[in-house]
Image: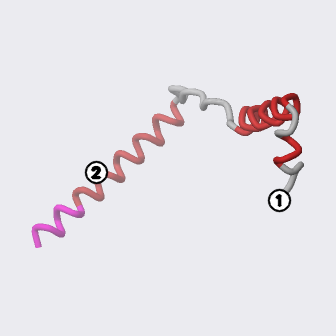
């Protein structure tokens, strides 16, 4: 597909180590950093409150539909 053929990579111990190191480096560089924990500011709290109100309203609407 791409890169050197595996027969030539693993024919030599050093080529095999280089190949393994490059695979591990690629994997290390591909994974993003861990997400930072959310801050407790007013905007995020207001967003949480809006979501909670929307969930309460939808639950109330479902109860009304069930009682019909």
Colour pattern: secondary structure
Tell me the quarter of the picture where residue 2 sits: bottom right
User: Is 67 inside the magenta-drawn segment?
Assistant: yes
Q: Residues within 10 Å of mark 2 (few under 14, many from 20)?
A: few
Helix, strand or loop under label 1: loop
Tell me the quarter of the picture where residue 30 sits: top right
Give percent across and percent down for residue 60: 22, 57
Helix, strand or loop under label 2: helix
Query: Residue drawn at (18%, 69%), measured in percent from left and top?
Result: 65
The correct choice, above or below, for 21 with respect to 10 in the image is above
What is the distance, in whole Å, between disc 2 and disc 1 at their CAs? 54 Å
User: Would you say the magenta stretch is mainly helix, strand or loop?
Assistant: helix
Query: Residue drawn at (82%, 59%), measured in percent from left and top?
Result: 1
Which of marks 1 and 2 precedes in the sequence? Answer: 1
The reply to whether dot 2 and dot 1 touch (C-beta < 8 Å) is no
Q: Residues within 10 Å of mark 1 (few under 14, many from 20)?
A: few
**In front: 38, or 27?**
27
User: Is 51 inside the magenta-drawn segment?
Assistant: no
Give percent across and percent down for residue 7: 84, 47
**Residue 1, label in figure:** 1
Query: Residue drawn at (22%, 63%), measured in percent from left and top?
Result: 62
Q: Which residues are drawn in magenta?
A: 61-68
Q: Classify the position of the C terminus by image quarter.
A: bottom left
**In front: 66, or 50?**
66
The correct choice, above or below, for 32 with respect to 6 in the image is above
Most extreme residue toward the left is: 67
Give percent across and percent down for residue 35: 60, 32
Query: Residue drawn at (60%, 28%), measured in percent from left and top?
Result: 36
Q: Which residue is mark 2?
A: 56
Give percent across and percent down for residue 61: 24, 63
């Amino acid at each position: 597909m791409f890169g050197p053929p595996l027969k030539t990579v693993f024919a030599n111990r050093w080529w095999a180590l280089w190949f393994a190191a490059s695979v591990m480096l690629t994997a290390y560089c591909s994974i993003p950093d861990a997400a930072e924990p959310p801050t407790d500011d007013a905007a995020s709290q207001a967003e949480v409150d809006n979501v909670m109100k929307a969930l309460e309203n939808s639950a109330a609407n479902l109860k009304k539909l069930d009682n019909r």
